[in-house]
Structures are given as structure tokens and as C-alpha cells.
Amino acid sequence: MPTVTSFGQTKDGTETQLFTLSNAHGLTATITNYGGIITSLLVPDQAGQLGDIVLGFDKLADYQGEGPLASPYFGALIGRYGNRLKNGQFTLDGKKYQLAKNNGPNALHGGVKGFDKVVWQAEPGTSADGQTLKLTYLSKDGEEGYPGNLTATVVYTLINDDALKIDYTATTDKPTPLNLTNHSYFNLHHGQAKNNFGHVLTLNADRYTVVDNTLIPTGELRPVQGTPMDFRQPHAIGERLAKVEGPAPGGYDHNWVLNGQGMRAVATVYEPTTGRTMEMLTDQPGVQFYSGNFLDGKLKGKGGTVYNQHYGFCLETQHFPDSPNQPKFPSTILRPGETFKSTTIYKFGVRK
């Protein structure tokens, strides 16, 4: 069974816990029921030395920071709608809904108090695959402007063959947009690399969603061929960073249209110094690859580490941004009687 320790109280006095999942090879994943945040992920390098490969904080209070010291969603579960919705609006079955504009003119990652800032009900356990943590949250009708009572369940499993699996399910009593993801920032050099430039990324995607100057998709699905967005063959993240076009300052913050359907391998990251590899599998149609452009050195993370620009990267499996306002994109509307189900797996290894 996972171990459980206190993680302190939220600002409103709610108790939180840390749950540590482990396997026979020494891998550990530590997750808090505040925001479903992965606070630590210990993975061995080519010498067998464990290192923490996710960005985050040592204290709950830091995850609840505000203003310039607010957490940029380190390790958190994101909902109801991951990524951006144009003008904080959508129309569903003829009714217009207005959300908080918390990212310039747009709504981002579920609103002012999204799934990343609530306390989930937690149930640690074990399965045939490994130790588990089941998290459940009821998002009430009207919360952050979204319709319907939505029950979301996320199960983290630290699989015995060195993978972290995330299973998402959700049901609702009114039609509602839904786009769930996890926002972990990775640095496979166990926090010792000054940036992610040397990480080598492969991404199985022929197209990406072009965005406007507020990072909202224009509707165009542009081929990656001949652009810095082409990761169909391995490329270091820093290799073409300066050539990335668009409003994202200094790098990648785009959604790629993943090839294939159903559960499949979509991305691999290799860090040559440590030999660590991370393979990602998902059943989702897209992934937001974000190169940590907005990290600016103001945040001090675990052990006092300063998180400068490009210190970590994200691979957020998802439906496309702004899908409720883009009729040509795959639908993200969940209706009563339906059950949303999705799985993403991060599988770890080494190359020597």
C-alpha cells in the first residue's frame, strides 16, 4: 500500500496528505490530494541512482502562492477544461456561457480555481499492476461558470514495469465541455540541468494547431514538415528553439495533432547525460508541448532550486485548445449518460 503523511492545511484550513507510491525497482511517485499534484517522481539513471525528475515545491504553501509567486500548475490535474478557451466563452446547445478570463482575454486551465486548486477525496490502494491512488472530485453545477454536476475520478498507478499510469473518468448530469490533463514539468537530469535544451524529443505528429497572438487556435492544422515543429525524427529541444514562430516568448507552447488513434506511443524523451528515457502513451488526439518559456527565475522550488526559463518541459495529453469554439476539432462535450474515459502512461527507462 502507498504510505500516507500530512502535507499541512490549505488556506481555508482543509487538511491535505501526501501519498507515496513505490515499486520493487525503487521508483516512487509522491502525490498530494491538493490538486492531484505529482510533487516528486524518483526514477533511476543509467548508474541506478534515483533522481527526482519533476519540478515542484517542498511545502503546500508554495503551491498556493499568488501573483508572481503563483505555481504555474506544477504537477497538477487540470480541469474542467485544460488549455485555453477564446474570450472565456463557449456556446452549448444554443446557450452562451461566460467563464473567468484568467489568461489575458482567455480562460485557461479551468479558471481561477480549477481542479489544480481543490482538495480531492483520496483512496490509496493496490492493483495487479502496482500501487494506486484514486482521487475523486465533484465539480458542482456552475462552478467556474461550467454547467452540470461533474464527477471526475483520476487513478494514478505506479506500474511494476516502471511506468506511471493516469486513468481519467468523468460523468455529468448536464452537457459540459471537458478536457482533463496533468501538467507535470519534467527535467530528466534530476533537476541538475540548467535547462531542457539537451533533452532529445521525438513526437509522432504530422501537424500542429496554429495559434493567434493570444495562443488561441486559428483552426488551421499546419504540416510540421520543414519547420521547427517537426519532431518526427529526434531533435534536441534547444536545437531550433529560437526559430519557433508565434506569440509564445522564447519557445514551444503549442498543441500537436497526434498520429493514430486509440492507445499508442506518441512521444519519447531522452536525456543523454543521465541516460534516462521517458516514453509517453495516450489515447488522446493531441499533446501540448511546452518548453517552460514563462519560467522566469522568480520561483524557488524543491531544495531552493531556482526555476529559470526552460528549466522544465511539459507534455500535456489533451483534446485541442478551444475545441468548444472550433466545430472542425474533435468534440469535447460530455453529455448525461456518457462516461468520459482516457489513459496516459509515462514509461521510464535508460540508455547506456
Image (spheres, rainbow, N blue to C red):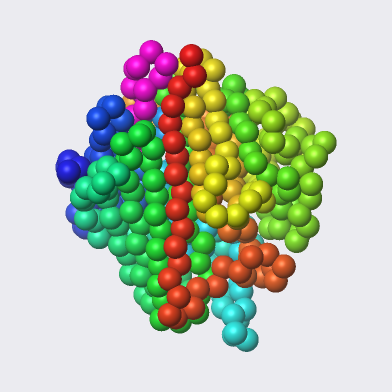
Task: Pick whichever, 329 or 143, lies toward us.
Answer: 329
Task: Examine the rendered structure and indicate whether residue 339 appears above or below residue 283.
Answer: below
Judge whether residue 43 is colored magenta: yes
Overall secondary structure of the magenta stretch?
A: strand
Give how far across and how far down residue 239 sits, in percent.
70, 25
**Residue pictured at 46% horizontal, 58% vertical:** 342
Residue 121 location, quadrant: bottom left
Residue 174 located left or right of residue 135 = right
**Residue pictured at 46% horizontal, 49% vertical:** 344
**Residue pictured at 51% horizontal, 40% vertical:** 280
Task: Pick whichever, 322 or 347, lies toward us.
Answer: 347
Task: Examine the rendered structure and indicate whether residue 53 appears above or below residue 265.
Answer: above
Give how far across and how far down residue 59 sits, in percent.
29, 39
Give how far across and how far down residue 33 sits, in percent.
28, 52
Marker count (numbered): 0
Residue 180 located left or right of residue 135 = right
Residue 347 location, quadrant: top left
Give how far across and how far down residue 136 sits, in percent.
30, 62
Quadrant position of the N terminus in the picture? top left
Task: Pick whichever, 229 or 280, lies toward us.
Answer: 280
**Residue pictured at 27% horizontal, 42% vertical:** 130
Magenta-drawn segment: 39-51
Judge whether residue 324 is colored magenta: no
